[in-house]
Image: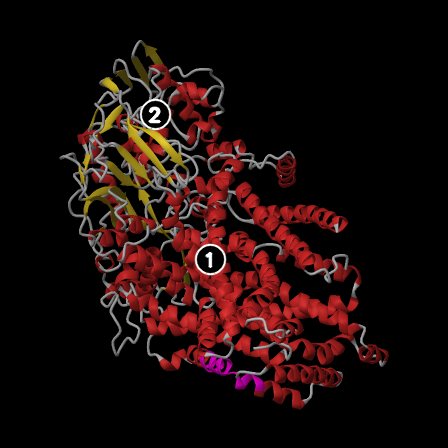
């Protein structure tokens, strides 16, 4: 890995040339060679590959929960409460005798839905608004910009708490709140791309051919911005999963009757559980951390793979 | 420059107005009001509706929305932040009680994260590709991946309850007269609060250091035969610091927001925990004031960062 | 319910039979309705229960235990074929819970839920039933029988008559089962081994009773100072003591009352009053203050202060309902509170004696005055009673009790030191240090684990087990009138 200074300079020079080539390349359709390069670069990053494996694994076991565990996440068993892990209950049981392994799997469904779902949805909102207003410009652009500025001038947790107070606590509200707090970043990204590309010759040309705005956006602008958008989605996913856990800690997250990672971990607030029943909080704490870590590794790998100027 | 700063400040005013109106409107739409939080539902069952209405009236809760907003706004313009509905305490008093605590916690966390982040980031960059670098990178990632309240609770379990080295929480005890008495109280929450930021600063410091090290003048300095450590420190580090300063500037308000949860974990009597209780008890004037304050902190910090960047790097022009 | 009590509640509660807590007023032979799923299924079948119908259950406690209990209820009901979903009420909880239908006999219901989980915590036992009178309940239509039985328990303060009246209403209610009693919540008083109450009794710690704090002693610390650590200090302001009568530490030690109750709040003796006298018909009550009483600032505590406090409390809604009922039963109270009279005709002052004449009989006069703390009138000149909590007095109140507020760091701690001129002698503890943590928040255990909690009380069963696990902590349960119950909305839905 150690690089001498000479070869470093050469590489920089080479990179610049590559960029030039790439920029020409990107003037056309998203071509296969670039896709390959991307995949190769991504997978050669060991951490990113590790992240992808862990991520896929956790998503799979959560989705396949009904096949993997015979228990119902809500079925209580008051005669078997707070039992340490056994062969029947891999992660032990909680304060009402529910199987914790099952709850972690089912909780994963909701938590991943909240995290990934909100991140994807806010990306969609951000891209749509950004592309559209960036393309048409004028008062719509100015309005969208002001609105995003308003949302982005709050520290995130303050805004989330305010919105929880205003909208009330429910699963769907939480997703809406995350979308509201998360769309701004991607919107700005998409808009900036749109603004710079709008003036590019080939876009002008496409327009003169009579191609409609959505098609131009979809076919030519989106692929260009895909890298940063994907990085942004991964970062948002990580942030939202952590936010869900934090809100549960404050008692302002998803209602307690729905198992989520945050709600399961939340019982660690009870010092007695924290001291005596490690299996109630440690496995789910590790799963959350591992999942967020894997998402962060993926995001990092994506960043490196899509941004050739990044060093390291 | 001056004109730019003035313009930026002038933009803040309509922003603040719009935000305050939206927040006020939003809170208006929530069901229930401060009165419904003052008295427990069990007791409320035995209190007559007329008496509750009288109480609402005395708190000004029965007036139409616009009137209340206007009264609030007028108060603000005259520098009167209003009164908390829960106990009628002046918000000015509440904030001047709580703000020092939050600032203290944030400042210490900022200090920790800057020192650890820069040092670790620079080490990581200088030893690029080594095991140390890899371990630091993965640890940094881990730092941003673990829920911070979880860190906090486990730290309490270990350091306060098992080892009994540090107090479980709180900020002051009777008989404290010097600032040094606070130290045992602030260490644990500040360290936990700084974990996420340390990871961020470390990352930035590493990549800007790498960036700087590849610059021509560093190589010139090296070719002049300066000792390696002087090259690294004097030139690389100084240049690398610019983006780090920017990052820290942007982080400041996030820190204030981020301390909400940590303050709750450690019973730290700051603005964050006050905000939570105000949200819970629908104490609108207090919620408004803290939200606005945090918005102002974000906007001011971003302005400062812009100015600072321009001062450090004259190539950045402010009048875009 | 027995299983739930044993497991979820860790044995720290008592399964309920009837709404009224166990005690001398409970008649024999009430049906406990033991858990019998087979019978339940049979009855449901007989009644033709539509198993596709989903019941909507609401609750308003945001703690983990309640959520767990809801999960248990859901599972138990599902077992017999009843679908139930539960939700936490938010916002204006009282309105969503307590709104009475316009037609209190036939409905339709003014609330949206089918089942409600909640509690009745009573200072006076009448509170358990008064809410079932026609036109007072959001879930149970009134009936002439019930109204008559309710009138029965409110019409007398004679113990024998009360016992008969309570037996009648409990038997009736046990048969009707309009509301399902679940369990009696206990209160747990914890004290560290550093503290010695020197033989004084334990009682209902949520209210004020004769606990003898003046005689309590604490092991001195390294500097020889005897400091008692506790919780329930204010976070933002000292709540005025008429609402949550004995919850906050300042309610307990900074303010004294005319009378003092025993631990079960049933018999009374003098406190600020040197003597008191109740007329045979119970309609006239007089209190004579001790000579030379002073407030913490040294100024004299007079019957004028007491009269001012009573009159002010008439005007404000944030007064405990039992106390409020007592003072509104005073002759002329209504005219005074609606503004048509300048003074209360039923309050007469004579030297050191205040005499109250009642317009309607109130069975709880002595109880109320064992909880109602007089305030120093001179600190509230020209105050709008509704704004009383807004007074700067509540940043550092002046009281009449054995301890006076010394140092206040809102949200950090409050210290209280003995009042040197206290009529009952100077307290033996040098200082009380209180932290702003309340009943059921996680900080209690943290503070206790760090030896920063010498005395306090909690209703949180999980905390109790944890406190019992600390070898330096002693926990004493106290039976209190506090029943958890499930309301059934009998009104038709709209």
* Other-residue count near label 1 (Cα within 10 Å), few / some / many at <14 / 14–19 / ≥20: many
Q: Is residue B283 above or below residue A176?
A: above
| Picture quadrant of residue C364 | top left
Q: Is residue A47 magenta?
A: yes
The stretch of residues the image draws in magenta is: A41-56
Q: Which residue is located at x 54 percent, y 70 percent? A: B206
From the top left corner, tell me how far across and down residue B8 is, in percent: 72, 50
Q: Pointer 1: what residue? A: B112
Q: Nearer the viewer, residue A168 or A183?
A: A183
| Picture quadrant of residue C307 | top left
The answer to whether residue C276 is visible is: no
Task: Identify the image quadrant of the C terminus of chain B.
Answer: bottom right
Q: Nearer the viewer, residue C428 or B180?
A: B180
Q: Which residue is located at x 48 percent, y 29 percent? A: C387
From the top left corner, tell me how far across and down residue C34 is, in percent: 21, 57
Disc 1 is placed on an element classified as helix
From the top left corner, tell me how far across and down residue B240 is, in percent: 59, 66
Closest to the camera, between mark 1 and mark 2, is: 1
Q: Nearer the viewer, residue A212 or C281?
A: A212
Identity of the residue furthest to the front in this view: B225
Disc 2 is placed on an element classified as loop
Q: Is residue A296 left or right of residue C32?
A: right
Q: Which residue is located at x 56 percent, y 53 percent? A: B253
Q: Is residue A199 above or below residue A45?
A: above
Tell which subunit mark 1 falls on.
Answer: B
In three-dimensional space, the C-alpha distance between marks 1 and 2, rounded to whole angstroms, equals 45 Å
Identity of the residue furthest to the top in this view: C351
* Other-residue count near label 2 (Cα within 10 Å), few / some / many at <14 / 14–19 / ≥20: many
Q: Pointer 2: what residue? A: C399
């Amino acid at each position: 890995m150690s690089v001498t200074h000479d070869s470093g300079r050469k590489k920089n020079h080479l990179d610049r040339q590559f960029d030039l080539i790439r920029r020409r390349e990107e003037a056309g359709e998203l071509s296969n060679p670039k896709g390959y390069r991307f995949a190769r670069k991504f997978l050669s990053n060991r951490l990113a590959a590790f992240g992808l494996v862990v991520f896929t694994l956790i998503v799979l076991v959560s989705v396949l929960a009904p096949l993997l565990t015979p228990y119902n996440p809500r079925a209580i068993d008051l005669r078997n409460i707070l039992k340490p892990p056994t062969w029947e209950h891999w992660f032990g049981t909680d304060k009402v005798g529910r199987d914790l392994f099952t709850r972690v799997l089912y909780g994963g469904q909701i938590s991943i839905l909240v995290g990934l779902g909100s991140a994807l949805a806010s990306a969609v909102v951000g891209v749509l608004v950004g592309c559209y207003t960036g393309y048409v410009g004028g008062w719509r652009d100015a309005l969208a910009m002001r609105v995003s500025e308003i949302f982005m001038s709050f520290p995130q947790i303050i805004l989330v708490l305010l919105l929880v107070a205003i909208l009330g606590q429910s699963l769907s509200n939480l997703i809406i709140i995350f979308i509201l707090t998360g769309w701004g970043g991607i919107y700005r990204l998409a808009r900036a791309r749109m603004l710079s590309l709008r003036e590019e010759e080939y876009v002008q040309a496409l327009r003169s051919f009579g191609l409609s705005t959505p098609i131009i956006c979809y076919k030519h602008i989106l692929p260009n911005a895909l890298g940063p958008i994907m990085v942004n989605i991964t970062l948002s996913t990580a942030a939202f999963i952590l936010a869900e856990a934090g809100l549960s800690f404050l008692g302002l997250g998803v209602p307690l009757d729905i198992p989520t990672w945050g709600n399961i971990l939340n019982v660690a607030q009870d010092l007695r559980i924290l001291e005596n029943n490690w299996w109630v909080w440690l496995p789910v704490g590790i799963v959350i951390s591992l999942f967020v870590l894997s998402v962060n590794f993926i995001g990092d790998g994506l960043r490196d793979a899509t941004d050739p100027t990044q060093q390291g | 420059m001056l004109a730019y700063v003035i313009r930026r400040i002038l933009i803040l005013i309509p922003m603040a107005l719009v935000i305050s109106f939206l927040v006020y409107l939003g809170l208006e739409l929530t069901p229930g009001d401060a009165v419904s939080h003052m008295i427990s539902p069990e007791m409320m069952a035995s209190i007559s509706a007329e008496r509750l209405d009288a109480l609402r009236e005395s708190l000004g809760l029965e007036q139409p929305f616009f009137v209340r907003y206007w009264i609030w706004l007028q108060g603000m313009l005259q520098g009167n932040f209003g009164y908390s509905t829960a106990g009628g305490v002046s918000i000015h008093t509440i904030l001047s009680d709580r703000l020092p605590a939050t600032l203290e916690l944030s400042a210490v966390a900022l200090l920790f994260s800057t020192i650890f982040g820069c040092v670790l980031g620079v080490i990581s960059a200088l030893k690029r590709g080594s095991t140390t670098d890899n371990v630091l990178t993965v640890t940094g990632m881990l730092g941003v991946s673990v829920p911070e309240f979880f860190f906090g609770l486990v730290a309490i379990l270990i350091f306060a309850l098992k080892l009994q080295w540090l107090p479980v929480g709180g900020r002051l005890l009777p008989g404290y007269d010097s600032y040094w008495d606070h130290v045992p109280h602030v260490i644990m929450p500040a360290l936990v609060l700084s974990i996420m930021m340390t990871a961020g600063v470390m990352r930035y410091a590493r990549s800007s250091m790498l960036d700087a090290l590849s610059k021509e003048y560093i190589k010139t300095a090296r070719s002049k035969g300066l000792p390696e450590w002087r090259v690294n420190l004097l030139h690389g580090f100084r240049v690398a610091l610019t983006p780090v300063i920017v990052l820290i500037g942007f982080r400041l308000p996030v820190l204030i927001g981020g301390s909400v949860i940590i303050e709750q974990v450690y019973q730290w009597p700051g603005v964050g925990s006050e905000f939570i209780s105000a949200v819970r008890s629908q104490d609108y004037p207090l919620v408004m004031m803290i939200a606005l304050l945090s918005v102002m902190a974000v906007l001011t910090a971003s302005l400062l960062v812009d100015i600072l960047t321009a001062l450090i790097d004259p190539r950045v022009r402010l009048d875009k | 319910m027995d299983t739930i009590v044993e497991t979820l509640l860790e044995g720290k509660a008592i399964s309920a039979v009837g709404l009224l807590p166990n005690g001398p007023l409970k008649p024999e032979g009430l049906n406990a309705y033991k858990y019998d799923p087979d019978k339940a299924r049979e009855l449901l079948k007989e009644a033709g229960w539509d198993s596709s119908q989903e019941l909507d259950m609401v609750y308003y406690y945001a703690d983990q235990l309640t959520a767990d209990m809801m999960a248990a209820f859901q599972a138990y009901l599902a077992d017999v074929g009843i679908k139930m979903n539960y939700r936490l009420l938010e916002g204006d909880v009282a309105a969503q819970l307590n709104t009475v239908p316009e037609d209190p006999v036939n409905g339709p219901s003014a609330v949206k839920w089918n089942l409600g989980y909640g509690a009745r915590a009573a200072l006076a036992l009448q509170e358990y039933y008064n809410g079932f009178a026609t036109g007072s309940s959001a879930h149970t239509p009134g009936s002439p029988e019930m109204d008559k039985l309710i009138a029965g328990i409110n019409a007398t303060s004679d113990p024998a008559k009360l016992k008969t009246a309570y037996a009648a209403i409990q038997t009736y209610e046990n048969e009707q089962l309009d509301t399902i009693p679940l369990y009696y919540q206990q209160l747990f008083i914890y004290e560290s081994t550093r503290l010695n109450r020197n033989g004084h009794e334990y009682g209902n710690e949520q209210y004020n009773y004769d606990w003898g704090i003046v005689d309590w002693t604490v092991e001195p610390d390294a500097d020889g100072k005897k400091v008692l650590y506790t919780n329930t200090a204010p976070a933002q302001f000292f709540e005025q003591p008429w609402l949550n009568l004995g919850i906050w530490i300042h309610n307990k030690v900074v303010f004294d009352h005319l009378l003092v109750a025993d631990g079960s709040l049933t018999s009374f003796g003098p406190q600020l009053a040197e003597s008191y006298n109740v007329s045979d018909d119970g309609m006239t009550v007089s209190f004579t203050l001790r000579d030379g009483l002073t407030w913490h600032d040294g100024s004299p505590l007079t019957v004028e202060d007491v009269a001012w406090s009573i009159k002010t409390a008439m005007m404000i809604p944030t007064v405990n309902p039992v106390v409020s009922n007592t003072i509104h039963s005073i002759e002329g109270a209504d005219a005074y509170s609606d503004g048509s009279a300048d003074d209360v005709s039923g309050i007469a002052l004579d030297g050191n004696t205040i005499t109250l004449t009642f317009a309607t009989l109130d069975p709880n006069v002595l109880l109320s005055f064992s909880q109602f703390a007089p305030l120093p009138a001179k600190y509230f000149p020209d105050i709008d009673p509704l704004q009383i909590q807004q007074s700067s007095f509540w940043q550092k109140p002046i009281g009449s009790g054995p301890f006076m507020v010394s140092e206040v760091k809102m949200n950090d701690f409050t210290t209280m030191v003995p009042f040197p001129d206290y009529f009952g002698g100077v307290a033996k503890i040098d200082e009380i240090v209180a932290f702003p943590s309340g009943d059921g928040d996680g900080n209690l255990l943290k503070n206790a684990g760090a030896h920063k909690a010498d005395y306090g009380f909690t209703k949180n069963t999980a905390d109790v087990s944890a406190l019992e696990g600390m070898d330096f902590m002693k926990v004493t349960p106290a039976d209190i009138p506090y029943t958890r119950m499930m309301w059934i909305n009998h009104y038709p839905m709209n």
